[in-house]
Image (cartoon, grey):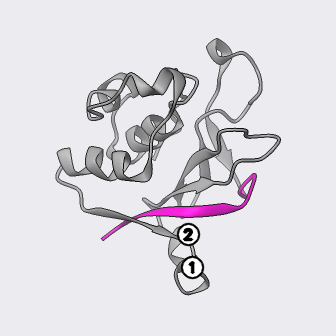
Amino acid sequence: MKPIAQKDGYGCGIACTASIVGSNYEDAKKLFSNSKQAKDFGFLCKDIVNAFAKKKLSYEYRYIKPKIKKKIYKSGAIVFIARSKRYPAGHYLSRDEKKGWMDPWINFPSDLKDSKAGFRKRLPGRAIYAILPI
């Protein structure tokens, strides 16, 4: 998994998808039927699951409860962290078992045109939804 920076204000879901499928941001954006939402709204978990389906990958999304908490640490998982002061719209991060959490805008809140992606050891907030490979 390589880090992919988001190029739209709400494109973290696209960048996480790109990182997992091994493509670039623009190609992954084409997997989203509602890709214009990356500019002003963002994506729901089901939008990301549908994008994976176009690549013939089976994923499901679930609210994170204690019994599935360990599953978010497997490679290929994506989590949505809750809205907060730091992330007013929430944020998606994808998981690589060896490298950690791929954050598509690790230098947030810098200007979007200067956004950089990278890996974190810990999540920068409370994960509330998981998008998991089946």
Q: Is residue 121 left or right of residue 46?
A: right
Where is residue 33? Give x, y as percent: 26, 32
Q: Is residue 74 left or right of residue 24?
A: right
Answer whether residue 109 is magenta in the image.
no
Residue plotted at (35% across, 45% down): 47
Q: Secondary structure at mark 2?
A: helix
Q: Secondary structure at mark 1?
A: helix
Residue tagged 1: 70
Answer whether residue 128 is magenta in the image.
yes
Q: CA distance from mark 1 to mark 2?
A: 6 Å
Residues shaded magenta: 121-134
Where is residue 98? Give x, y as percent: 56, 61
- Mark 2 surroundings within 10 Å by alpha-carbon count, few (fewer than 14), some (14 through 19), many (20 or more): some
Q: Disc 1 residue type?
A: Lys
Dividing the picture into quarters, in which one does residue 107 lie? top right
Residue plotted at (80% across, 40% down): 86
Residue plotted at (56% across, 69% down): 73
Q: Are marks 1 and 2 in contact (CB under 8 Å)?
A: yes
Viewer-nearest residue: 45 or 77: 45
Quadrant occupied by the C terminus: bottom left
Where is residue 36? Give x, y as percent: 39, 22
Q: Disc 2 residue type?
A: Tyr
Residue tagged 2: 73
